[in-house]
Amino acid sequence: MKMSQYPEVIYNHRQPLVSVSYEYGEIDIELPLVFPGMISVAMLCWIFAWNEYLFANLLTGTTVKTFPVHIPSFTQGSQTLWNLVMAFSMVAMIPPVGMFIILRRYMVRGLSLGVVKG
């Protein structure tokens, strides 16, 4: 194998561009275009994992429970303690809403970047 078959990675500190040169040509990857999409996917995956009920219900024991698993335990027979259900629901909503507020710029850009034609 010749040394020219291995890619040479060139990092340019002035521009957010990673240039990879192969024997047959160059491939330019612009990381700022990919970053909002990565943030959007990471946020959606984290929200889906946070709201997972069935998996958490099967794996947790009786002493340790996650928020979504603990909320239905406030129903006793035909009586439901609505004040505790609403309080736990509000506390369970704080982390996803806070994350969305902090990262909403990347979320909107990442979700709308592939929609624009042209």
Image (cartoon, grey):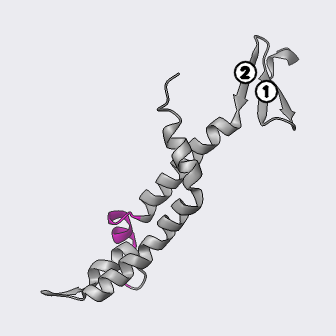
According to the image, label 2 marks what residue? 27
- Residue 92 found in image quarter: bottom left
The tag on residue 89 is: none
User: Crowding near pointer 1: few (<14 within 10 Å), some, many (20+)?
Assistant: some
Give the extent of the magenta segment: 51-62
Q: In the rendered view of the protein, which quadrant contains the N terminus?
A: top right
Q: Is residue 100 left or right of residue 77?
A: right
| SS class, disc 1 | strand
Identity of the residue drawn at 49% across and 30% down: 116
Ranked by sequence position, the earlier of labels 2 and 1 is 1
**Residue 29 in sight here:** yes
Q: Is residue 8 above or below residue 91?
A: above
Query: Does the CB distance between marks 2 and 1 fall below 8 Å?
Result: yes
- Residue 27 found in image quarter: top right
Residue that protrudes farthest toward the top in the picture? 24
- Residue 67 found in image quarter: bottom left
Asked if residue 29 lies in the magenta stretch, the reply is: no
Type of amino acid under label 2:
Ile
Along the line of sight, which residue is nearer the eye, 118 or 87?
118
Along the line of sight, which residue is nearer the eye, 111 or 92?
111
Identity of the residue drawn at 53% across and 49% down: 107
**Residue 61 in sight here:** no
Give the image location of residue 24, x and y in percent. Answer: 76, 10
According to the image, label 1 marks what residue? 19
Type of amino acid under label 1:
Ser
Q: Is residue 16 left or right of residue 71?
A: right
User: Crowding near pointer 2: few (<14 within 10 Å), some, many (20+)?
Assistant: few
